[in-house]
Structures are given as C-alpha cells and as structure tokens.
Amino acid sequence: MDATAINDSGAGRTAASITLENVGKVYPDGTVAVGDISMEVRAGELAVLIGPSGCGKSTVLRMLNRLIEPSKGRILIDGEDIAAQDPVELRRHIGYVIQNVGLFPHQTIRANVGTVPRLLGWNRKKTRARAEELLELVGLDPARYGGRYPHELSGGQRQRVGVARALAADPLVLLMDEPFSAVDPIVRGRLQEEFLRLQAAVRKTIVLVTHDIDEAVRLGDRIAVLAEGGRLLQYASPADLLSEPASAAVGEFVGNDRGVRRLTVTKVRDAMRPMGQIEDIERLPTVDAGGTLYDALSVMLTSDALNVVAMQDGKPVGTISRSLLFDVPNRQAAART
Ligand SMILES: Nc1ncnc2c1ncn2[C@@H]1O[C@H](COP(=O)(O)OP(=O)(O)OP(=O)(O)O)[C@@H](O)[C@H]1O
C-alpha cells in the first residue's frame, strides 16, 4: 500500500487536531441533542463516538463539518474556530463517509472517487490518476472496477469506494457515520481490518460513529461513550474503558463480557513471557505474536492447552499461559499505579 502520494496536502499537514469546548445543540423544537461536551481528538487519532440510539452521536459529527451549527460552545480544528471559517472551504478538508455511502448512481466508480478533486478544479488527468491510486489503496483494482457503476458492486465494495472518495482530496479529518453497518458481519470484519491497515498508512484524524462496542474497541484509539441528551460519560482508551468504566452506566454499556473483550486490546507480544520456562515447546500450539490475547485464548480452548507459543517470522519468541490471561486485568491496573 503506497501512502506517500496521499500525504501531499498543500500545507504539508496530513491530519489536524479537533477540540470541542462545551459544545451543545438544542434543536428548534427544544430537543437537547447534545448537552455540554468537551473533548479533544489528537491529530492522527481515531476517536469513536458510541452510545444508544438518539444520544446525539450524528449531531456531534455533523457539527464538526458545520452541516449543523452548535447552539453553544466552540469547535476548533488545529486550534482554529471553525465558526469563523467558510463552511464550503472547511468541508474541503473534511472527508465524510455515511452508512449507505451515497455514491452517485449514474456515475462510474472512477468518477465517484474523483468528485472532490474535480470540484477543486484538478485537470482530468490528475483527477483520474488520483482516483485510480485511491481505488488501489482501498483494495479495488481500478482496471476492473473503475468503469463500473455503483449497482454493479457489492455492499462491501461500495463502502470501500465511499472511503476512497472521502480520502480523494487528502482531507485533514475524516468523519464516518456508521460506515460499516450496512454490510454483513463477515464482510464487516474484513472491512474493519482493511480500514485499520489503511489508517496506519494515511494517519488521518478520524471521528467514527458506531453502535457496536466491538467495532469501537477494535478501531478506536479513544472511545467517547455518550448517553441520552448528548452527555459524555467517559472518554478513554479501549483498555481503560474496559478495565475501569467510570460509572455503572458505562460498565453496563460496554457489557458484562468486557473481561473477555479486554483480551482483544492486548497484543500477544506485549504480554508474553520469555522463552525457556516451559518444557515440550515443540508440542504446544502456536499463536502469532502480532495477534491478541483473545487469539491466544481461542487457540488454548480449541487445543485444550494450558500454554501457547508466540511465533514471529516462523520462530518462537515467547509463551502465554492460561494463568497469565486471567492475570491481565491486574497487571494492567498495576502498570497504571
Ligand atoms: N432536526 C432535528 N430536529 C429535532 N430533533 C432532532 C433533529 N435531528 C435529530 N434530532 C434529535 O436529536 C437527538 C439526537 O439525534 P442524533 O441523530 O444525533 O442521535 P444518534 O445518537 O446519532 O442516533 P442514532 O444512533 O439512532 O443514529 C434525537 O433525540 C433526535 O430525535
């Protein structure tokens, strides 16, 4: 995946920080959609907004690109108040991906991806080259898919086109409103994985709305849990959110299975013990050192083993024992104090 060409925004920046200061939104009918939210998303970070239906997630997202104006507070992008900026100009730096993508049905995939560059006045050659580069980046062969129309693609492929289109003008910020919810769970898992790889390459500042706590834990650098009335209950890393929910309400929201879920946020290589303490290494099942403790647990359960060997580049590099897995919460808590 070649990301170098993506990182060529005029000002030399590739991502921007986002700051919300006491932001609130009351709709004209009196509905308090967002109460009083203060939070910061660092440049290059992926923040997830999660919470029950109607808690104001989309409203927060749409205030960031001024599709909705806040009733109070300030929103700063790279330290500059967006209220003072021209909304059209602002949106040129902000990609927006929504649930059903909203591709133009009568335009080819290539033309859809080139929409914003065209609006920016790029010439045909440059726009086409950019569209092809982006399609490749999201894993769609431009020669095969570029000339097709949206209805000739699967839901998952359309979703990737939506992401490519949002990245086309090299935005500083990417807003994503339930981007993966319209596809089935298997495709969804694959898209999430691809998306993580893409984000590792392009490092945009991303705010992503979801209903799905697993998706939040998997994708987020930090997770904002919202409650009805747009109240921010907690804003923390996935590991902190799972190990130390700030209130009973957050604990309930992240689920009773959060102990298991927590295993999904710790990498094998960060928790393994050095080799040498376990006998019969060659008879033990293996797990990739880049996998998570959840993967290690799954291997243990399917092979009925008490230990697994972590492998990297075909070589054993450490071990994980079942007791170590059960010890993770305590180790994480101890590491913090
Ligand atoms: N234009 C509007 N006028 C009045 N109330 C609105 C308007 N748009 C949204 N709301 C209300 O504001 C609240 C927050 O809506 P919002 O769409 O931000 O929630 P959400 O968390 O994104 O919900 P969901 O997860 O169901 O998409 C809801 O109670 C909704 O009914």
Image (spheres, helix red, strand yellow):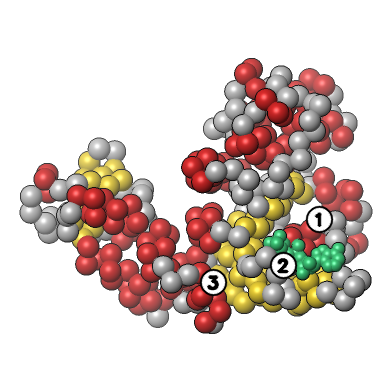
Image quarter (top left, top right, bottom left or bottom right) of the C terminus = bottom left
Residue 253 got which mark?
A: 3
> Label 1 amino acid?
Asn
Q: Nearer the viewer, mark 1 or mark 2?
A: 2
Left or right: 292, with 144 as reference point: left
Query: Distance from label 3 to label 2 (Cα)?
Result: 15 Å
For image coordinates 50% across by 58% down, the residue present is 214
**Pointer 1 residue:** 65
Which quarter holds ligand 1? bottom right
**The residue carrying mark 2 has its beta carbon less than 8 Å from ligand 1:** yes
Question: Which secondary structure lies at badge 2?
Answer: loop
Circles 3, 2 touching at the beta carbon (< 8 Å): no
**Pointer 2 residue:** 54
Crowding near the residue tagged with mark 3, few <14, some 14–19, many ≥20 C-alpha atoms within 10 Å: some
Image quarter (top left, top right, bottom left or bottom right) of the N terminus = top right
For image coordinates 22% across by 67% down, the residue present is 323
Q: Position of residue 100 (x, y in %)?
A: 71, 43
Q: Position of residue 87 (x, y in %)?
A: 89, 53
The tag earlier along the polypeptide, 1 or 2, is 2
Crowding near the residue tagged with mark 1, few <14, some 14–19, many ≥20 C-alpha atoms within 10 Å: many
Q: Position of residue 166 (x, y in %)?
A: 72, 41
> Observer-nearest residue: 127 or 188?
188
For image coordinates 90% across by 73% down, the residue present is 29
> Label 2 amino acid?
Gly
> Observer-nearest residue: 327 or 81?
327
Crowding near the residue tagged with mark 2, few <14, some 14–19, many ≥20 C-alpha atoms within 10 Å: some
